[in-house]
Amino acid sequence: MDTVGTLLRTWRGHRRLSQLELAGIAEVSQRHLSCVETGRSKPSRDLIRHLSRVLEVPPRHRNELLNAAGFASEYHETPLDDEAMTSVRRAVELMLSSHNPLPAVLLNRYWDLLDVNDGALRLLDRLHVDSEAIMSGTPNIQELTFGDAGFGGYLANRNQLAAAFLEHSRQEARLDPADERVAGHVEFLEGIVGAGGPIDHGTGAVIPVHLRTPDGDLRLFSTLASVATPGDLTTRDLMVELFFAADDATDRWLRS
């Protein structure tokens, strides 16, 4: 197990800060910070929490820093199927069901599809996507969006949508450079968009999901609703994506 000093040096390296720079930003003495990093001084719980905030260490890794210094975790991780999460599950179910007949899905931080409402299943079925086969596993929304087994064959603005996903994934990778799944998402999306060049945000307020179907063009956009509750890693990782029609024709199609 890495020491708290080693972990702090690692995160300081991720943020490309010298020891002097971190000490200045955190308003602690460089000498004390050096002693913490080399193990000559044990940091207090408050100092670890303070340095974690300054270094933008994700909550999951803040626990690692605290544990390495001999302190209890700050954040719990309660399984979603645990009895203690009953109220959270009910809230998510209400968000999904109340959005019918429009599509809504429950995602984790990796964009894995954890649950869907009837509107989402109906959209998949009407586009001849095998929803039963997809939901038998834990599909990823990026693979579903861009893959041939999902919407890939219908997607008219593939590059623009992939660029939006890529920008988000790059931000996640910056926050947690050691996360291999996020790095994999960046690589997958750069394979669609290209590793360099500007991100195409389009000209509107939203980036639509533009599908060309046998019934005509469909345009949807989505908003993300966080399910986060204080102090729990599981809920921090959950979000409900609510899809809306971007034009009247799509709205009629979704409600028909």
Image: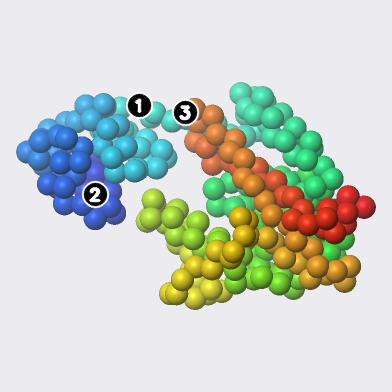
Q: Can you give x and y, in whole percent of width and height, for residue 54 in the image?
A: 28, 40
Residue 111 in the image: above or below residue 62 = below
Mark positioned earlier in the residue sequence (3 or 2): 2
Q: Residue furthest front?
A: 203
Which mark is nearer the camera, 1 or 3?
3
Q: Quadrant of residue 208?
A: bottom right
Where the N terminus falls, by quadrant? top left
Judged left or right of residue 42, residue 98 is right
Q: Quadrant of residue 32?
A: top left
Residue type at mark 2 is Arg
Judged left or right of residue 214, residue 10 is left
In this orientation, does residue 114 appear? no
Q: Can you give x and y, in whole percent of width and height, for residue 42 in the image?
A: 16, 31
Secondary element under disc 3, as helix, strand or loop, is loop
Query: Is the residue under label 3 in contact with that under label 1 (CB below 8 Å)?
Result: no
The residue to which callout 3 is attached is 231
Secondary element under disc 1, as helix, strand or loop, is loop
Q: Can you give x and y, in whole percent of width and height, for residue 204 in the image?
A: 62, 60
Secondary element under disc 2, as helix, strand or loop, is helix
Q: Which residue lies furthest to the left in this view?
A: 31
Between the C-alphas of marks 1 and 3, the distance is 13 Å
In this orientation, does residue 237 appear? yes
Residue type at mark 3 is Gly
Q: Which of 19 and 157 is in front in this view?
A: 157
Which mark is nearer the camera, 2 or 1?
2
The residue to which callout 1 is attached is 72
The residue to which callout 2 is attached is 12
